[in-house]
Structures are given as C-alpha cells and as structure tokens.
Image: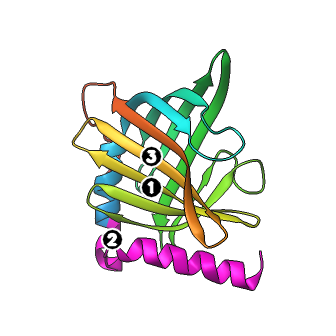
Amino acid sequence: MSAASRSLALLSLAALMSAYPWSVATASETGRQFFERVAGKWSGSGEIVAGKYKGTKFVCSFAGSTPAGKTGMTLDGDCRVGVFNQQMSATVEHGHAGFRGTFLDGAKGKGLDVVGGAIERETAVFAIHRNALTGAMRAQLSGQDKMNITISVHVDEELVPVIGVALKRVDQGTVSAIAD
C-alpha cells in the first residue's frame, strides 16, 4: 500500500469514527456492552451489492460469543449460496492498542485484519485491511433482535458498500459469556 493510499485510508477511518465520539476511558465499557448484545444466535439474508458478484444473495447463521475476561466478540457460522456453504468467522477484541481482530483467517490468509475502530451505543465501525485493500465494517444493532452489517471498501477516494447482511436474533435473548 502506498503512503498516499495509507493516508487516505486513515483519513477515511477518522472521518467515519468522528461521527461516533468516544473516549479511551469509556471505550472498553461501551464495547463490552455492545459485544454482550451481539452474543447469541443470529440468522439472516444478505447480498453482494457491488463488484464481480453483484446481485448474489446468500443466507447466514452465526453464533456470537464474548471471550472470558476480555472486551470483544467472536461470530462463528456459515453463509450459504444455493447448495454451497462457506464457513465464516470474525473476531474482534479491544486492548491497549485499540480494536484488533480478524475476518476469516486474517490478511495473512484469505481474510482481512481488523486494524482499528470505534463503538458508540448501537453502532460499531471497524477498519479492515488486506494488502492494498482498505475499508470498514459497520454493525448496527436495532433493539435486542436485529443487526445490520455492511462491509465497504475504498475505491479510489470513495468508500463503497459491497456486502450487506440483515440478521435477526434466533435465540431467546442476549446471552453473555463475559466473566467478571
């Protein structure tokens, strides 16, 4: 990634995060509350809205959990297109260096790295990165039983949505696995 591209990516993330003001002191607590609400079972449909596979529809099922003693989450499950299944997983944790994590097996494999982010109430925005590709994943909770996820990538100087997923909780309520 060139210095200009890296600068553009950081500026774009800063612009995204400026809409979600937060302080380092409250980031962990805000994140913990958000991640607790993500814990549980989710299912829903999605669509690729840009790129080579534009218009492809899929159905996903995920189990969300939170790591004991840490502020973070893991979503594990799969997405199905017709008769084809693809395992999916995402892990994000908040530590001293901010939000870090992976989508699938991370940028060293076939996935993406989470390299930063912010959480404000019902919305999380995470910066994603793989080689020269940069973008953002936005997760928006609506009440206790709905979550919309949008993955966007930088194309030239614009952040373009490429995948959208609308999930509904399929368990009986928020499940928390955070140990005190």
Residue type at mark 2: give it: Tyr
Nearest the eye: 46 or 174: 46
In this rendering, position of residue 72 left or right of residue 76: left
The disc at residue 138 is 1
Q: Quadrant of residue 147?
A: top left
Q: Residue at x 73, y 85 (%)?
A: 3
Element on which disc 1 rests? strand
In the rendered structure, are the residues bearing label 1 and label 3 in contact, judged by CB atoms less than 8 Å apart? yes
Specify the quadrant of the image occupied by residue 29.
Answer: bottom left
Q: Is residue 169 left or right of residue 90?
A: left
Is residue 126 inside the magenta stretch? no
Q: Distance from label 1 to label 3 (Cα)?
A: 6 Å
Q: Residues within 10 Å of mark 1 (few under 14, many from 20)?
A: many
In the image, taking residue 145 as reference, residue 128 lies left or right, namely right
Tell me the element at label 2. Answer: loop
Q: Which mark is residue 149?
A: 3
Q: Which residues are magenta?
A: 1-28
Q: Amino acid at mark 3?
A: Ile
In the displayed orientation, state which residue is furthest to the top: 83
Give the x, y percent position of residue 94: 46, 64
The quadrant of the image that shows the N terminus is bottom right
Report the side of 155 relative to 126 (left or right).
Answer: right
Alpha-carbon span between mark 3 and mark 2: 17 Å
Please determine whether, in this image, residue 88 is positioned above or below residue 93: above
